Amino acid sequence: MRTWISSRPALIGLYLAAVLGLSVGVWVYGYVQALDQVAARGRSDLELAADRLVTQLQRYREFAVLMARHPTLELLHTVGDRAVAEAVLLAAADKTGTLTALYADARGQVLASSTGDVPPDLAQSPHFLRALQGALGVSLGIRNGQRTFSFAAPNFGATGKVRGVLVAVVDVVELEQDWRGTLPTVYFTDADGQIFITNRSELLFWKPAGDGAMEAPDLARYDVALQRLGGHEIWLQDWSPYVPQRALYLSTPLPVIEMEGGALIDVTPARRLAALQAAVVVAVCLFLGALLFLTTERRRALALANIVLEERVAARTRALSATNTALRREVREREEAEAALRQAQTELVQAGKLSALGQMSAGISHELNQPLMAIRSYAENGVAFLDRQRPEKAGEALGRISEMAQRMARIIRNLRAFARQESAPVTRVDLGRVLQSAVELTETRREQAAVDLVWQRPEAPLWVRGGDVRLGQVFVNLITNAADAMEGGARRRLEIGIVTSAHTLVTFRDSGPGIEEPDRIFDPFYTTKAVGGGDGMGLGLSISYGLVQSFGGTILGANAAGGGAVFTVALEPWAEEVAA
């Protein structure tokens, strides 16, 4: 115990020294990481400023190149009017913001000028000499106390030699107006390293003085201390209140305008962030150290707290288990309810079909009775023709009997298909065949109601996604409802049409009184028929709506523009890739 007490100050000192070393390491690491982010943002700002400057100068460069071939200026070499040419140059300079635009011959003699300001050493200027060589000349300069940027574009004669040069002089101050005082400290130097363009006016015309120092126009010397950290170059200087004293230096060459861009990015935020990270690490380490000293004293309290916590966790686990059991039971009950609902829906669909068959029973009996009576009559006639030795007439009677039998077979086949309880998945269905079957099933009901049907079955199969029986039930319901709606009306006409587009549309348009409440037409048990009349409970359209939705389609009901109601069934066309 005494040994531990005597060594405790040493352990504390060693721990504090380790914390100090760790904080320094964290500060350096955080500082370098923050400098990477500052450099990325600063380089983006520098590139933005450089692009803005180059873009602004590009306008004057294009002006010089295009204006050099102006017809009015070319005439100055022969019989051109100088006044007219100067007016053209003045108008063009005003439109583009050019300070001065002049045109000279190959000897340097000015033939026209927008302002009358002619530099005395034009023929010896670098940009003019460069243009005489057939290239675009660029140079910096100071005229009448103004910083200028000059472009010289050659004009080639018929022989291919330069016979004239157009010089466009740009005022640098106008270029700086858009970004002066914005962004970090940004400047652009000429070939000698002199600052010629900047958003900090106090740095104008500064140039390197050796040993990393800078020299102002008044010959004042400003020293710069360099630091390198993590591949970054940091300048420590005291140039201006508007230039950060500790700044990250970035540069980029601009060969297009023969300049180099530089930026000084303030690193104070990076140092502040690194210091904050180091402070957090120190705080965490001191906090953890304090916890280490208090661990022994609080061990018993933690053990008791752990026991209480385990009891609470056990109680909570029991509660969660009970809740989980209840949820499983509820899920099972809901699944059973959904299964019962699906079964009820299936039975309801079948009941709707049987109800429709019951309503059509009288007509079906009539449809079957007629062929039977005809078969009996043709059979008697056939026997009589055979007795009279007229086999050709007997053959005709037998042919008619075969036709009547086929008609009865078709009626029975349609009835059996309609009454069948279909549970197969969605398959390929011939829409024309299903519609024709529904028309034949409802023929007697339409004849009873004296309905004039307008319907033309498509010549080729029209494949849609659905089910033969279920889709046929939908069409039978719609035709039967239309006949019921038109019963008692003066004009009874039902039109069935098919339109093919993104979806295949089947329309049923009747000449009845229309729909009173279109929004409720597909609600269960909604009907406009007399209560207790035996015409149904208002489930036909609701069942049809569910059947069409099970095919991935829709059904809509609305009042037609010229009177009556129109029901539209939209079905998805069958595609082989969908089936695959």
Image (cartoon, grey):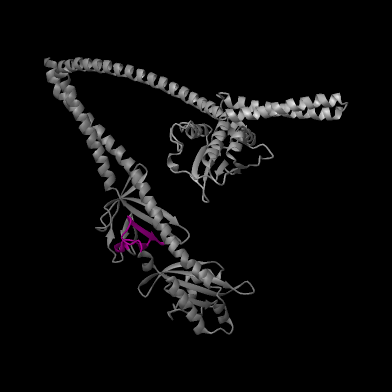
Asked if 353 appears above or below 113 in the picture, the reply is above
Q: Position of residue 557 (x, y in %)?
A: 49, 42
The stretch of residues the image draws in magenta is 178-203
Q: Position of residue 181 (x, y in %)?
A: 30, 60
Q: Is residue 326 magenta?
A: no
Q: 67 or 107, which lies in front?
A: 67
Residue 65 appears left or right of 341? right
Q: Position of residue 375 (x, y in %)?
A: 73, 26
Residue shown at the point (49%, 35%) measured from the top left: 541
Residue shown at the point (39%, 57%) measured from the top left: 49
Residue 47 in sight in this render? yes
To which quarter of the image does residue 197 belong?
Answer: bottom left
Asked if 190 appears above or below 479 in the picture, the reply is below
Q: Is residue 183 magenta?
A: yes
Q: 278 or 556, which lies in front?
A: 556
Q: Position of residue 357 (x, y in %)?
A: 56, 27
- Which image quarter holds the N terminus? top left
Residue 14 appears left or right of 63? left
Q: 397 or 402, which lies in front?
A: 397
Residue 556 appears left or right of 210? right
Number of numbered discs on residues:
0
Residue shown at the point (57%, 44%) measured from the top left: 492
Residue shown at the point (43%, 63%) measured from the top left: 56
